[in-house]
């Protein structure tokens, strides 16, 4: 499933930066369940959501793009 690639990348960067799901969700102003759905791949993140995550994690949105999707 395509969405799980995004979720795995988001989860990996979240952990790398030392955030728990609860902390990141609170900073993004979303519920933990929404963030969990995205990380598990059952929900596709919007472009705006990806920008918010990248900003909080101090990375570029391009770094969240799954390697298979890079043109």
Image (cartoon, rainbow, N blue to C red):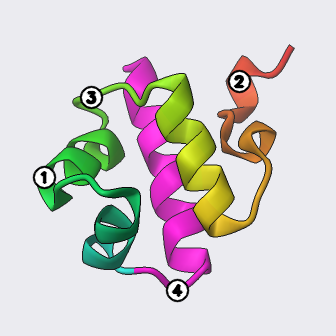
The Cα atoms of the two marked residues, 1 and 3, are separated by 11 Å
From the top left corner, tell me how far across and down residue 3 is, in percent. 40, 26
State yes or no: discs 3 and 4 in contact (Cβ < 8 Å): no
From the top left corner, tell me how far across and down residue 67 is, in percent. 74, 33
Question: Magenta span: helix, strand or loop, mainly?
Answer: helix
Pointer 1: what residue?
33
Q: Quadrant of the C terminus?
A: top right
First in sequence: mark 1 or mark 3? 1
Pointer 4: what residue?
18
The Cα atoms of the two marked residues, 2 and 4, are separated by 26 Å
In the drawing, does residue 56 fall left or right of residue 45?
right
Q: Residue furthest bottom?
A: 18
Pointer 3: what residue?
43
The Cα atoms of the two marked residues, 1 and 4, are separated by 19 Å
Q: In the picture shown, does residue 41 fall above or below 44?
A: below
Circle 4 sits in a helix, a strand or a loop, which is it?
Answer: loop
The Cα atoms of the two marked residues, 1 and 2, are separated by 27 Å
Circle 3 sits in a helix, a strand or a loop, which is it?
Answer: loop
Circle 4 Cα neighbour tier, 10 Å, few/some/many (<14 / 14–19 / ≥20) = few
First in sequence: mark 2 or mark 4? 4
Circle 1 Cα neighbour tier, 10 Å, few/some/many (<14 / 14–19 / ≥20) = few
Residue stretch in magenta? 1-19
Circle 2 Cα neighbour tier, 10 Å, few/some/many (<14 / 14–19 / ≥20) = few
Residue 47 within the magenta-colored segment of the rendering = no
Pointer 2: what residue?
68
């Amino acid at each position: 499933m395509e969405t799980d690639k995004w979720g795995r990348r988001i989860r990996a960067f979240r952990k790398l930066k030392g955030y728990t799901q609860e902390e990141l969700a609170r900073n993004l102003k979303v519920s933990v369940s929404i963030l969990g759905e995205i990380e598990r791949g059952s929900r596709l993140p919007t472009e705006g959501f990806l920008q918010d995550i990248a900003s909080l994690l101090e990375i570029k949105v391009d770094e969240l793009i799954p390697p298979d999707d890079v043109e």
